[in-house]
Amino acid sequence: MITLAGLGIASAVILYFVAQKFKVIEDPRIDIVADILPGANCGGCGFAGCRNFAEAIVKAESLEGLACPVGGAVVMGNVGQAMGLTVEATEPKIAVVRCNGSKAHAPAKVVFDSASRCSFAHSLFSGESGCPDGCLGLGDCVVSCHFDALHIDSETGLPVVNDKCVACGACVKACPRGVIELRYKGKKDRRVFVSCINTEKGAIAKKNCEVACIGCGKCVKVCPFDAITLANNLAYIDFEKCKLCRKCVAECPTGAIHELNFPTRKEPVATSEQSDTTT
Amino acid sequence: MKTFKIGGVHPEENKLSAGKPIEVFPIPQKVYIPLSQSLGAPSKPVVKKGDVVKVGQMIAQGEGFISSNIHSSVSGTVVKVEDYPGAGGYRSPAIFIDVEGDEWEESIDRTEALNKECALSPEEIVGRLKSFGIVGLGGATFPSHVKLMVPAGKKPEFLIINGVECEPYLTSDHRLMMEHGEELMVGISILMKGLGVTKAFIGIENNKPDAIGHLSKLASSWPGIEVHPLKVKYPQGGEKQLIKALVNREVPSGKLPIEVGCVVNNVGTAFAVYEAVQKNKPLFERVVTVTGKSIPTPGNFMVRIGTLVSALLVHSGFSAEDGLKVIGGGPMMGKALTNLDVPVVKGTSGILVMPASESKRMAEQSCIRCSRCTTVCPMGLEPFQLATESERAFYELAEKDRILDCIECGSCHYTCPSGRHLLDHIRVGKAAVAKLIRARAAK
C-alpha cells in the first residue's frame, strides 16, 4: 500500500516537471478560428484540413490569398472579425464540366470493357467516342466529391454538377483530362463557357463529336469585351472578362458554347442542345 | 526440364499458325510510318513533303540516348508528316508515303547467300545497329545498340536468346527459327562478339520440338551456342523469368539483367542483327502472325512497317462478323486496337482476332481471398493487395510492396476466379508510383 502510494506520488512529481519542461504554448486563436470553419476537411483551401488552415491563418496574420470555398464569404467574414483582419472579397466559384460529348453527340465507336476508372481508361485509349480530350464518363470526379455535388447522368453519360458544389477543386484534380474547371458562379448563377477542350483540328474534332469546338474563331470576333481567346484550335472564355452578353452563344456554329440559367430568348437560338445537361 | 521457379500459368496454347510458312506480304499502296516506334524519345523526321525515298532510306533520326532511327519500308513519295491515331486512338506524328515501285537502296545486299564472316569490331557492330534502327522485337522495342553498350564496371557473361514465345497464338518467332535458323546463328555470333561473351543460350519452350531439334543441330557447329528446351509455362519469355530458367540467377529488384551478367535478346532481334550487319539491311520489315479462331486462314507474314492492320486482316479472310475484338500482340499482354487502320510497327508481333464469344470479360465480383493471384505471380508479389492499394490511391504503400517489380504479364488477372481487374489497377498504380518517384527525385 505504502509502496504503491509512494510510486504514485513520485510519478506525479516527475510528470509535473516533464509537463512543465515540454509545455507547448498554442495560440488560443487557432481554436477560435477552427471553430468558425465548417469542419468539412475537404482540402479545397489548399491545406490538409480545417485546423491546418486555421493554423495558417493565425500564422499569416493576414487573409490575403486564403479563402474557404465551403464557407464562402460568410465564414471568411466571421474569421476576419475574430482575427480583426480585413477580408478580401472573393467571388464564389463552381465546378463546370467542359465537355458536352454525350452518348448522342459523340457516339461510341468501341466498347470499353475493363476497370471503370477514368485514370485507367485515359492511360489506355482515347475514349469510346475517339475524342482524346473529352469526358470518359467513368466517374473519377464523382468518387472524389465529398459534397455529393456530382453524379453521372445515365442518359448523356456525362457528370452533372448540382448546387451543393462548394468549388473545393477535388474533381478538378481527379479528372485525368482536365475537363472540369472552377469558374465564377455568376450573378443569378448565370454562366457562359466553351463546353469543349478538344485541341484537334476542326474536321477531326467534328468527326468524333458534333458539338466540339472547331476553332473557327467566330466567337472571338463577335465578343465585344475581348474575353475570348483562341489557341490550339480551341476557344476559351475568360470568366474574369466575360460580361455574359451571350453574343458568342448565338454565333457558335457547333453549339459548343453554353449558357446556363438565362431566361429563354424570344427568338430560338440554333444551339443543338439546351445546356443544362452539363451544369 | 528447366523452367523458372515461382508462379506462372499455362493458358491454352492455340498455336493455330505454327505450321504456316512465312509468306511475303504484298507491298501496300501507301504506308503510315509512326515516328515513335521504340522505347524512349520519338525520332525526328529528316524527310519532308514531296521527297522521293527508296526502300531502306533513313526517314527519321533517333534523338537522345534511348531512341532509334526509322527507315522507309517502301519506295515512293512522302505525302506529308502529320499526326495519325495509333492503337489507343491517341494521335502521334507519322510519315505518310505513297508507294511507287520497289526500289531498294543500292547498298542493301538482296541475295539469299549466307554470309557467315563478320569482320567488324564490337564498336562498329554497335554503330551499325544504331544507324540501322534495330530494336528488340520481342515486344518492348528497346533499342538494341543500347543493350550492347555495357555500363562501366559490369561484365556480361552470357548472351541469352529468347525463343520461348510463351504468348498463346503467336508463332512468328517459331517460324523464324524454323526458316532462318542459319542466319539466326550468325546473328547470335555477332551479338556475342559485340558483347564480348563466349557463351550464348537459346531458350525454347518444349511445345516447339521441331525448332529445338533444328536449332540444336545447327548450334553443334557453332562453338559457345547452346539450345535449351524449357517446360511450357507463361511468362517464361519475360527476361527475368528466362534468366532464372536458363542460368538460375535472380535479377535484383529494380535492376537490369546485366547485374547478373546476362543480356537477353529475342530471336527476331538476332535475325534483324544478321540482316543489318551482314546484308546492310535496316529494320523495315518484320514477321507478323495473323491469327484467331474465327480467322479463315491464319498465317505468318513478312510485313513492311507501316502496312495497315486492316490490309493484313482482309488478306487472311477476316470479315467484321468474325470478331469483336482485335488485339495487337498476344492474348495475355497485347492491347485491343481501337481502330483497324493502324499501321504495323516494329513492335507488332501478331494480330489476334477474338470471336464475340471470347471477347467479353466476365463480370467483376468481390475478392474471395483465395490467393491464386499470389501463387501465380512470377515476381512473387501480392497482386490483390497491389490492386487494392492502387484503387484506394495508397501509392506509398504500393511502392513499399514493390509494385514497380510487376512485369504486367497478366497471370493474376488470368487466374482470378472473381474476374477482378487486377492488372488494370496495378498499371494505374505503377504509373502513379513512378510519378511519385520522379517528383521525389526532382526535389
Image: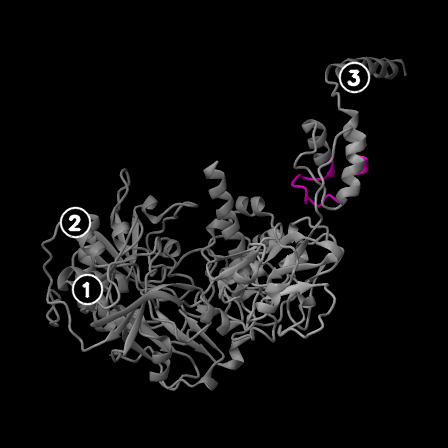
Q: Callout 2: 10 Å neighbours few (<14), some, many (20+)?
A: some
Is the magenta region chiefly helix, strand or loop?
Answer: loop
- Front residue of A35 and B110: A35
Q: Tell me whether circle 1 and circle 2 mark residues in contact (CB < 8 Å).
A: no
What SS does tag 1 mark?
Answer: loop
Q: Tell me whether circle 3 and circle 1 mark residues in contact (CB < 8 Å).
A: no
Give the residue at mark 3.
A15
| Label annotation for residue B57 | 1
Rendered position, B361 above or below B435: below
Q: CA distance from mark 1 to mark 2?
A: 24 Å
Pointers 1 and 2 within a single chain: yes
Pointers 2 and 3 within a single chain: no
Residue depicted at x 22% and y 49%: B195
Q: Is residue A279 left or right of residue B401?
A: right
Q: What is the chain identity of the residue bearing mark 2?
A: B
Magenta stretch encompasses residue A40 = yes
Residue B197 visible in the shown view: no
The mark that comes first in sequence, 1 or 2, is 1
| Label annotation for residue B122 | 2
The amino acid beneath tag 2 is Pro
Residue depicted at x 30% and y 46%: B261
The amino acid beneath tag 1 is Gln
- Front residue of B343 and B59: B59
